[in-house]
Amino acid sequence: MRGEVLFFFDLEVVPREATLEEIEELGKGTAPSNYRDPDKIARYESHKAEELYRAWAFDPLNCEIVCCSYAIGTLETTKHGEVLFDAGMVRTLRIDQHDIIADLDRIAEGLLRETRRRVRVIAHNVKGYDAPVLMAAALRSGSTNLVQLLRFEKPWESNLWDTLEWWRTHCSTGGRRSSAKLDSIGRFLGVGSKMQGMDGSKVFDEYRDGNLDLIVEYCEEDVRLLARVYERLLIAI
């Protein structure tokens, strides 16, 4: 029997905490040159500062991980060719980024000990977003196991498996321009969709309002959907 260990995960991040001076500095000088009214300029720069501050969530140098949901599953192929898939139970690391990274490093250590089974680290857009964010945080904290697990510069040595990359390659005519959102793929394949009334653009607002439990629920649902999409793709992998 051939086997694999599957590590499904998803992150939710927000811009790191910033001072009022830092945020104000973001908006300075952004008003169009034809603006003359000081109040209009101030309003524009304030709005732009908020927009630019929110964009920090996409920058590994300026974002903060507020939760990481994950599931450790297995994929076994019997000698008769039967495929046995178990998505595992979804769990969540939350609140403090330092503790989240420390716990992920311990998980990575366990995964790296696997010698008989291949390890796949699976996420949607993992190479374009999740892995770089985690890699930066792992380097900052010196989390060597997590750094090793996330390396993907050599495809033949990489543990990473990106559902977005696979879909773009095999099921999209738009190539790398295709957004191919996980929710859209899930709906198309008939395996489910993301939590209704919640999406990534609302995470920061919910975080500001203290609704971390809702963010965690959203993150966990993403991991469940990710696993269902991956299970459906197995017939083509």
Image (cartoon, helix red, strand yellow):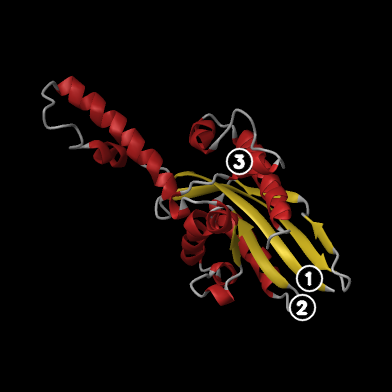
Q: Is residue 114 above or below residue 206?
A: below
Q: Earlier in the sequence, mark 1 or mark 3?
A: 1
Q: Residue 126 versus residue 52: which sits nearer the camera?
A: 126
Residue 204 location in percent, x, y? Answer: 49, 36
* Residue pictured at 46% horizontal, 63% vertical: 140
In the picture as drawn, the residue positioned furthest to the right comes out as 80
Q: Quadrant of the C terminus?
A: bottom right
Q: Picture coordinates of residue 110 (x, y %)? A: 71, 69
Above or below, 51 against 153 in this view is above
Quadrant of the rendered structure where residue 86 is? bottom right
Spatial CA span between label 2 and label 1: 8 Å
Q: In the rendering, which numbered label is found on residue 84?
A: none
Dot 3 surroundings within 10 Å: few (below 14), some, or many (20 or more)? some
Which circle's residue, 2 or 1, is located before the other in the chain?
Answer: 1
Residue at 62% of width from left, 47% of height from top? 94
Name the mark nearer the viewer: 2 or 1: 1
Q: Which mark is residue 116?
A: 2
Q: Is residue 235 left or right of residue 84?
A: left
For marks 1 and 3, give the CA distance. Answer: 28 Å
Q: Is residue 212 above or below residue 114?
A: above
Observer-nearest of 117 and 55: 117
Image x and y of residue 167, in percent: 57, 54
Question: What kind of element bears circle 1?
Answer: strand
| Residue under the point 51% across and 33% down | 202
User: At which x and y percent is residue 150?
Assistant: 56, 67
Q: Amino acid at mark 2?
A: Arg
Where residue 183 is drawn, which disc sits there? 3
Asked which secondary structure carries label 3, the reply is: helix
- Residue denoted by label 1: 3
Quadrant housing the N terminus: bottom right
Asked if the residues shown at circle 2 and circle 1 are in contact, with their CB atoms under 8 angstroms apart, the answer is yes
